[in-house]
Image (cartoon, helix red, strand yellow):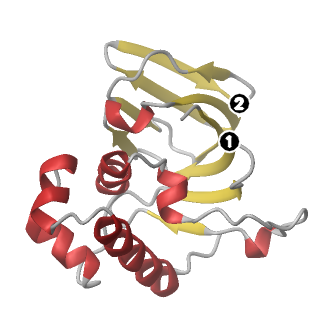
Amino acid sequence: MSIIEDDSSAHLAARIARERESRDWSLADLAARSGVSKAMLSKIERRQASPTALIIGRIAAAFGLTLATLLTEPEAGEPRLLTKARQPVWGDPATGYVRRQVYLSAGMPVELVEIELPPAAAVSFPASTYVLTRHVVWVLEGRLVIVEGDSRSELAAGDRLAFGPPSDTTFRNEARTPCRYLVTVLRTN
């Protein structure tokens, strides 16, 4: 998977600034709502820092957006066919977690995201990421451990998990090989 870091960093920085300004929020306001420091938010908007998946999840939740809609704005006239080469890809600089936005639509409340999680990697998201959404994970290759609050689920290729009520969630690849899985998100807001 190729990651278009320069384009996605610029897009993400501009998107965060635009969302913040459209709400008439200062950096301090967004920091208070997201739990991300004002200094880090400033660095992200100025493209001096690459945010992790956890930070982007917190920012998206503060705006009331899904991670996908913060990273990739849905278009009203999206094409019926979107080749793999044109699907937006974002990578977490801290973990090597890579997400490919397979499907996102302004007119349909469903998102499909393919994730590749490297061996021995983990990525976490706060409970606020899962408010106003429903998630189902289907493992395509490898093994995946999902910890939702106090609940631990171990999934192998072909297994799926429908998430429960919103809780802090960690995705872990405890294996020595990459794990690839599909996340289906239903936006209920």
Q: Quadrant of the C terminus?
A: top right
Residue at (42, 72) in percent of width and height: 15
Question: What is the secondary structure assignment of the residue under circle 1?
Answer: loop
Residue at (20, 58) in percent of width and height: 30
- Please state the horizontal and vertical placement of residue 108, each as a whole percent of the image: 74, 45
Which residue is labeled 2 in the image?
157
- The type of residue carrying mark 1 is Pro
Quick check: can you spot residue 37?
Answer: no
Q: Nearer the viewer, mark 2 or mark 1?
A: 1
Distance from Cα at disc 2 to Cα at disc 1: 26 Å
Query: Is the residue marked by circle 2 packed among few (<14), some (14-19), or many (20+) residues within 10 Å?
Result: some
Q: Quarter of the image holding residue 171? A: top left
Front position in the image: 121 or 52: 52
Query: Is the residue marked by circle 1 packed among few (<14), some (14-19), or many (20+) residues within 10 Å?
Result: few
- Please state the horizontal and vertical placement of residue 119, each as a whole percent of the image: 48, 47
Choose the circle earlier in sequence order: 2 or 1: 1
Q: In the shown orientation, is residue 100 left or right of residue 118?
A: right
Which residue is labeled 1 in the image?
109
